[in-house]
Image (tube, rainbow, N blue to C red):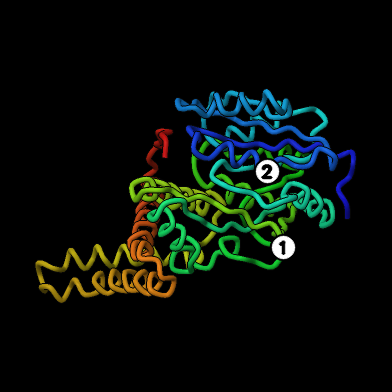
């Protein structure tokens, strides 16, 4: 099915201090103006770098690109505000990321798929790529089963209906009827929305044609913060909807608990207690070394450390939120740059 000429698409790009990525992201996602009408709303959460200036320069040449202030700062708020203030003709919302490059006809393909499948949402696959040696190692970890646990949208996938994926296109009416993203929790808003969407009878379609290139965090510190938030958000979503974690989500928590138990037992039974964490670290580092050798890229030796950082940070975030909920602690969050 071809894109309807009556379609109006609002592309929503949440942003916060994205001067290194935003120009390329915008250039790659802009659709052909002959296909349908559109606007691109950059929802700025208070950038202190050159993000605003870059967007204003782009807007001077393409008035469809607009810089909008997001006073509530989070990505959830960016989407919700955009859904309310976008052009009244908008029928489709498309969420875009600054840390990504989009393949040709990405918007057109998403809109066509949304219409052809009669879905409420179209999601896509993502492939991590790096600009620096360390970022490339982190990308390698995220692209592998060691790092992503086999999550369908984190690898090249066949098209089909799914429970979750990397968010792309939404039917605007459906998005608003479900009250958009849940802003009461700062992380995992996409998976939480997908849970509500499916519960409401909506369908999510993974478009396997439209894999995006994603730039991951470029340092271990920022990677640890990101994965802590992923784990925190996943625990919050599971608790809110009474869902059970999948095996790939439970494994990092189990590994962390075994490692903690081993350290606690060390004073009592000696160095033998440290065997489980030693085996875990060895497996991850050996996997990174094998990856570096097979790809002939020495920097990929760091992929093992990246995987450990991802696993442990995710598990700590998950357990933190789990314990907060069990002890009925109030929600605590400070929005800070990753």
Q: Residue at x 75, y 50 (%)?
A: 105
Q: Position of residue 135 (x, y in %)?
A: 42, 53
266 lies above or below 241? below
| Residue receiving disc 1 | 161
Q: Position of residue 270 (x, y in %)?
A: 10, 73
Q: Quadrant of the rendered structure where residue 82 is? A: top right
Q: Quadrant of the N terminus?
A: bottom right
Q: Quadrant of the rendered structure where residue 81 is? A: top right
Q: Nearer the viewer, mark 1 or mark 2?
A: 2
Q: Secondary structure at mark 1?
A: strand
89 lies above or below 323? above
Q: Residue at x 71, y 60 (%)?
A: 209
Q: Quadrant of the rendered structure where residue 258 is? A: bottom left
| Residue receiving disc 2 | 29
Can you tell which mark lies on residue 50? none
Which comes sooner in the sequence, label 1 or label 2? 2
């Amino acid at each position: 099915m071809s894109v309807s000429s009556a379609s109006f698409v609002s592309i929503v790009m949440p942003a916060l201090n994205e001067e290194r990525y935003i120009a390329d992201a915008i250039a790659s996602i802009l659709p052909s103006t002959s296909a349908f009408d559109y606007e691109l709303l950059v929802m700025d959460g208070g950038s202190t770098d050159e993000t605003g200036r870059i967007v204003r320069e782009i807007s001077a040449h393409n008035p469809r690109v607009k810089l909008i202030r997001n006073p509530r700062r989070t990505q959830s708020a960016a989407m919700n505000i955009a859904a309310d203030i976008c052009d009244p003709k908008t029928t489709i919302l498309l969420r875009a990321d600054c840390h990504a490059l989009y393949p040709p006809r990405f918007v057109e393909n998403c809109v066509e798929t949304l219409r052809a499948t009669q879905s409420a949402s179209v999601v896509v696959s993502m492939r991590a790529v790096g600009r620096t040696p360390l970022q490339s190692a982190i990308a390698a970890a995220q692209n592998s089963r060691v790092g992503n646990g086999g999550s369908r949208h984190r690898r090249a996938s066949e098209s089909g209906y799914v429970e979750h994926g990397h968010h792309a296109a939404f039917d605007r009416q459906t998005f608003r009827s479900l009250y958009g993203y849940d802003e009461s929790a700062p992380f995992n808003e996409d998976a939480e929305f997908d849970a509500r969407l499916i519960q409401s009878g909506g369908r999510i379609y993974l478009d396997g044609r439209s894999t995006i290139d994603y730039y991951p965090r470029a340092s271990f510190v920022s990677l640890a913060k990101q994965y802590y938030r992923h784990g925190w958000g996943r625990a919050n979503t599971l608790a809110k909807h009474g869902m059970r974690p999948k095996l790939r989500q439970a494994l990092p928590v189990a590994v962390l608990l075994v490692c903690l138990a081993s350290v606690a037992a060390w004073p009592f039974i000696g160095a033998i207690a440290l065997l489980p964490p030693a085996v875990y670290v060895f497996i991850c580092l050996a996997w990174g070394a094998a990856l570096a050798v097979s790809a002939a890229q020495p920097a990929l030796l760091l992929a093992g450390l990246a995987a450990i950082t991802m696993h442990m940070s995710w598990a700590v975030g998950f357990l933190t939120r789990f314990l907060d909920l069990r002890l009925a602690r109030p929600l605590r969050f400070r929005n800070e740059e990753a």
